[in-house]
Amino acid sequence: MKSLFSVVIPARNEESTIQNVIKKVSNHPNVKNVIVVDNGSIDDTANAAVNAGAYVISEPVQGIGRAIKRGIAVADTEYILRTDADIKNWDSDWLRYLCQSKANCLTRAIFKSTYDEFPVTRLVVKPYLEAFVPPLANLQTPISGTYFFKTDIINWQNLPDDWSWDIALIIKSYERGLIFNDIDIGVLIDKKRDIRHYETMARDIHRYFLNKYISPKEGQLYEIQY
């Protein structure tokens, strides 16, 4: 991989982990910039990111997809590494494998966890993939959170603004005939979440599948309430 690339990190209230992520992803000669998109934090995420050397922009309207798209739009490189802000054991060695993508690839970090049972993947994503996109049903870590891709491989501007951004990226890439280049990074340690954290994520992903694969009444979109 010889091309320069930008790192896009959406972040909301991640002051305790954001600096470590920035320092680790910066450790590659082809990183042009690290763009942190502060998505309405009420803690010191933005200042922590600036102090770690990132370029920080604000996206006050909450939505991880919205934040990611804002970051990609600001980046001036043809390749993007998108990753999460709450990864505690980000390892610079991952970059050697993640950042070797070709133009027709979506490179994904796949991983295991010693404590996370991936409730949204098990209870929402996989059943929908089995029903509507069977070739992707056995995809490991389908909502990985860490991807490397060329920005023109897909119309990323039209991906959702919410938590369904990641699965929409996977499905659109599959529809485009892109190759999935899966890199096993081993065990990933991120912030432990209360089950309530996953409610919004599950709702957004439910809505994405319903609106994509089940024809709603004309002019009506499905809304999922919890």
Image (cartoon, grey):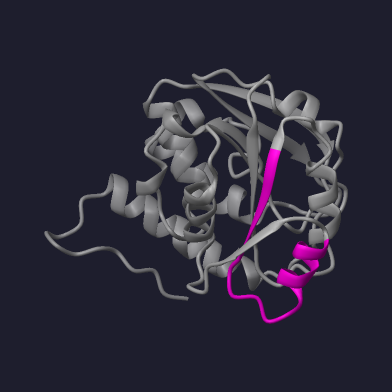
Name the residue rendered at 37%, 38% in the picture. Answer: 155
Q: Which quadrant would residue 207 be assigned to in this image?
A: bottom left
Q: Nearer the viewer, residue 183 or 3?
A: 3
Q: Residue at x 81, y 46 (%)?
A: 113
Q: Residue at x 56, y 31 (%)?
A: 149
Q: How many marks?
A: 0
Q: Quadrant of residue 54?
A: bottom right
Instruction: Pick the residue in front: 34 or 196.
Output: 34
Vertical placement of residue 88 versus 50, above or below: above
Quadrant the N terminus occupies: top right
Please state the horizontal and vertical placement of residue 32, each as a whole percent of the image.
68, 39
Q: What percent of the width, then of the height, locates residue 95? A: 78, 31
Left-right relation of 42 to 139: right
Magenta-highlighted residues: 32-51
Q: For residue 122: magenta? A: no
Q: Position of residue 98 (x, y in %)?
A: 71, 28
Front residue (pair 143, 50): 50
Q: Is residue 143 left or right of residue 61?
A: right
Residue, far bottom: 42
Queried whether the magenta region covers residue 38, the answer comes back as yes
**Which residue is found at the position 43% from the left and 31% from the top?**
152
Above or below: residue 192 compared with residue 173: below
